[in-house]
């Protein structure tokens, strides 16, 4: 077992009580960087806090819900107190007993083009015809195939380090598509050749935001991490997650979103695509979200699509969730279910 023997204790010395907080992380460089950045923020806010970070090797590789599962097991068994995830890797329904206690301020949520060094200076528009672009995301492939029919899209697998190596050290790919946020966290911002705006490629639900998963019953830890909530990010991500949940879309469906908060209005654009992008249903809805509504103490309040945010106004949280559900229902009324079912079947058959 990779988790070091970390013990949760309350140390009592010279009148102060310090609890050691144990953070669980996967071993990938991105996971470590993300966990360390949250540890740093917690240390700034709570200088007396003692943090320990234990890594856990993946025993099962593949399905996304499995790869977050290992860490949930460690949470459940009380081996760790909190786990940092990319929000976009967390399912819209968490297993009972778990909740997202903080959603941190979102980085650039857009996708980015990373070019083979020999193509430096080019873009998806100017790359030669039939250039091979690497991505395993159905969402990215669907949108980009439609928008750039002259390009060829092929799967590329592995963690970010592996993918960059495959790009640079071989001639298989002219470019690959990755989330700008992950590239920035890895310190690879300089490799971004092009950031894809919503007209080229809308992003995945929760993309670019970090989430802290905790035991739902652990009130102390919940309260401690809740100060890390970024209100705009929380509301945007609740709307996005409610949209995906209502569509019954998992991690790997061609569903994309775009959200904005302006003058207390939350805008959500959502879309579903066929695998080649030719079928597309897309719409935008909006709702008022007043962050100056009376803040409620939230005792006993429910989570919103897995997110517990007692420090935010309940009215705003409810409105954000309803926005996502309403937009999904609108697209479902126009036939979104057929598009997604067909996409799932074709993808499973590949
Ligand atoms: C999910 C997808 C991908 C990750 C699917 C999608 C990309 C898979 C691929 C749900 N999770 O986006 O349509 O490219 O084959 C992932 C990344 C990050 C979190 C890497 C990336 C970092 C960025 C973030 C993998 N999960 O998307 O480039 O925190 O949002």
Image (cartoon, rainbow, N blue to C red):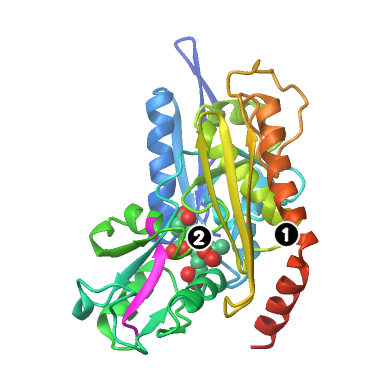
Quadrant, the N terminus: bottom right
In this view of the protein, which residue sits in the foreground, 48 or 241? 241
Q: Residue at x 69, y 18 (%)?
A: 296
Can residue 92 be seen from the camera position used here? no
Q: Is residue 325 above or below residue 69?
A: above
Residue 98 counted in the magenta span: no
Q: Is residue 238 above or below residue 258?
A: above
Q: Is mark 2 within 8 Å of ligand 1?
A: no
Dominant secondary-structure state across the stretch colored magenta: strand
Image location of residue 337, percent across then percent down: 77, 68
Q: Quadrant of residue 278?
A: bottom right
Residue assigned mark 1? 331
Q: Residue at x 54, y 59 (%)?
A: 204
Please rate how many residues cluster around mark 1, counting C-alpha atoms within 10 Å: few if below 14, some from 14 to 19, many from 20: some
Q: Quadrant of residue 158?
A: bottom left
Q: Tags 1 and 2 in contact by the CB under 8 Å rule? A: no
Q: Residue at x 46, y 74 (%)?
A: 147
Q: Quadrant of residue 215?
A: top right
Q: Is mark 1 within 8 Å of ligand 1?
A: no
Residue 175 counted in the magenta span: yes
Among the two numbered marks 1 and 2 on one chain, the one whose residue lies closer to the N terminus: 2
**Start and end of the magenta stretch?**
173-180
Quadrant, the C terminus: bottom right
Residue assigned mark 2? 202
How many marks on residues? 2
State left or right for residue 195 relative to residue 286: left
In this view of the protein, which residue sits in the foreground, 175 or 38? 175
């Amino acid at each position: 077992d990779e988790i070091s023997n970390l013990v949760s204790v309350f140390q009592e010395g010279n009148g102060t009580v310090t609890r050691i907080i144990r953070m669980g992380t996967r071993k990938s460089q991105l996971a470590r960087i993300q966990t360390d950045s949250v540890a740093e923020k917690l240390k700034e806010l709570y200088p007396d806090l003692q943090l320990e970070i234990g890594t856990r090797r993946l025993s099962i590789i593949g399905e996304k819900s499995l790869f977050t599962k290992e860490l949930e097991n460690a949470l459940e068994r009380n081996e760790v107190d909190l786990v940092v995830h990319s929000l976009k890797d967390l399912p819209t329904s968490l297993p009972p007993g778990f909740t997202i206690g903080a959603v941190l301020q979102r980085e650039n949520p857009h996708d980015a083009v990373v070019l083979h060094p020999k193509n430096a200076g080019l873009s998806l528009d100017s790359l030669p015809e039939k250039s091979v672009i690497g991505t395993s995301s159905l969402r990215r492939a669907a949108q980009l195939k439609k928008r750039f029919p002259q390009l060829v899209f092929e799967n590329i697998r592995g963690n970010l380090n592996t993918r960059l190596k495959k790009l640079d050290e071989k001639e298989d790919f002219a470019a690959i598509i990755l989330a700008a946020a992950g590239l920035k966290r890895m310190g690879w911002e300089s490799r971004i050749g092009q950031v894809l705006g919503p007209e080229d490629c809308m992003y995945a639900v929760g993309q670019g935001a970090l989430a802290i998963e905790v035991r739902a019953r652990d009130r102390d830890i919940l309260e401690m991490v809740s100060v890390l909530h970024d209100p705009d990010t929380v509301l945007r991500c609740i709307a996005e997650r409610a949209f995906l949940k209502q569509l019954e879309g998992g991690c790997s469906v061609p569903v994309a979103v775009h959200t904005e908060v302006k003058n207390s209005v939350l805008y959500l654009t959502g879309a579903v695509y066929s695998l080649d992008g030719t079928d597309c249903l897309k719409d935008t809805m909006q709702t008022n979200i007043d962050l100056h509504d009376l803040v409620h103490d939230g005792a006993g309040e429910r989570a919103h699509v897995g997110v517990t945010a007692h420090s935010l106004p309940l009215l705003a949280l409810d409105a954000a969730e309803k926005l996502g559900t309403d937009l999904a229902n609108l697209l479902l009324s126009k036939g979104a279910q057929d598009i997604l079912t067909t996409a799932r079947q074709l993808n499973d058959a590949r």
